[in-house]
Amino acid sequence: MNYLQKISHFMNPTIEADVTRDMDRRSLKNIRIVSIIIMSIEIASMIIYLSTHLRSLGKDDGARMLSVFCCIALCAAAHIVSGSMLQRDTFQHYHYFVFKVVFYILFSIWGLVVDFRHYTAGEQMLTFYTVNLIMVCFILFRPWIGAILLGSTYLALFILTMNFDGAQGIQKVNYVVLTIASIVSNAVLYHNQASVSKKTVELTRSNIMLENASRHDALTGLLNRMALEVDAGKVDGQDLTAYMIDINYFKEINDQYGHAAGDALLKETSEILKQLYPGGRYYRYGGDEFLILTHKPAHENYGADTYDFEHAPSGAKVVLSIGSAHGNPVEYQELFALISRADKALYTVKKRTHSEAYGGHDRRK
């Protein structure tokens, strides 16, 4: 990679969408915090100033008060809008970008106006530099965008002072150095934050993967008993039907055709159950037993208490025994009582399907 490519990558790095989103939201949090701090300082300063100069207020004091009111209004608006955006998770990157740019431009204009008035009065210019320092430290802009925004505001102040007195009150070399330092600082901060946000996103993804792994059966991909424990705490009294399903003679199929065939049968059964009971919550309850919890009415689910199919890889005829129970559980214990009723219904079905009259046999013999 040559120097031009390195510079191009530094000014316009490739960053994935999730990392960019994390950085956008961090900027909003910073704006929310900074705006309330600045607003509090300005209000306190105004109160102190008015308490000491109330009887001697003049025309210049009116201009100062107006600038303070403008700052307070901008801060209040920024605090409210940023807070509203943080509460909602539907905004795209360009929404955050537009808000940040508008926030920067409005505060920069305010800083320009205030400090140009100070400049023409022969006073020190601190407001503009303070505003830009805050922007560099807390607001994240892609380096090339930050360069345009920062460069434009510094150039605007320089043009104003040039038109007034040839910018005699500005040391031009120092001003240029400060402009470049601000642009570079913004770029460095952006890259540093991108690195932090990338690690945050990767950690979040890892946590999600671990959580999913801990709540899902590795073979079938269905939910497991741990997930059921979590879901049991969320029941809310709605109509709920529990289906307990068991593969008849699974051990014999497993022994005859091998564990690979048994695993394939468990996977195939899990997919069949999703078709028989669409829209439910599917759990591998243990071994060859499955549990389905669904809010759908009975006519939208498979209604029989057995289901036959042929396991294609082995050619074995497979029969599923199905027990069900309906209720309106409102707490953890009631849900497991419902599941217990479905399990008893399953046991009744299995007794029948394992009987000689049904063509079955006692697998204990």
Image (spheres, rainbow, N blue to C red):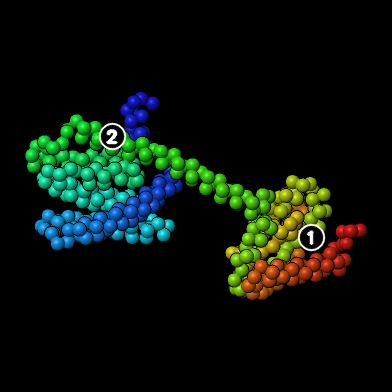
299 up-or-down from 103: above or below = below
Residue 24: x and y in percent read 38, 49
Quadrant housing the N terminus = top left
The nearer-to-camera label among 2 and 1 is 2
Helix, strand or loop status at disc 1: loop
Q: Is residue 17 left or right of residue 147?
A: right
Nearer to us in this view, 40 or 315: 40
- From mark 2 to mark 1, how far is it between C-alphas? 75 Å
Q: Residue at x 64, y 58 (%)?
A: 227
Q: Residue at x 18, y 49 (%)?
A: 114
Nearer to us in this view, 227 or 52: 52
36 up-or-down from 336: above or below = above
Which residue is label 1 attached to? 248
Q: Residue 170's mark? A: none
Nearer to us in this view, 256 or 173: 173
Q: Is residue 191 visible?
A: yes
Amino acid at circle 2: Ala
Amino acid at circle 1: Asn
Residue 27: x and y in percent read 37, 49
Q: Is residue 39 visible?
A: no
Q: Residue at x 87, y 62 (%)?
A: 361
Where, by quadrant of the figure, is residue 44 drawn? bottom left
Q: Residues within 10 Å of mark 2 (few under 14, many from 20)?
A: few
Which residue is label 2 attached to? 181
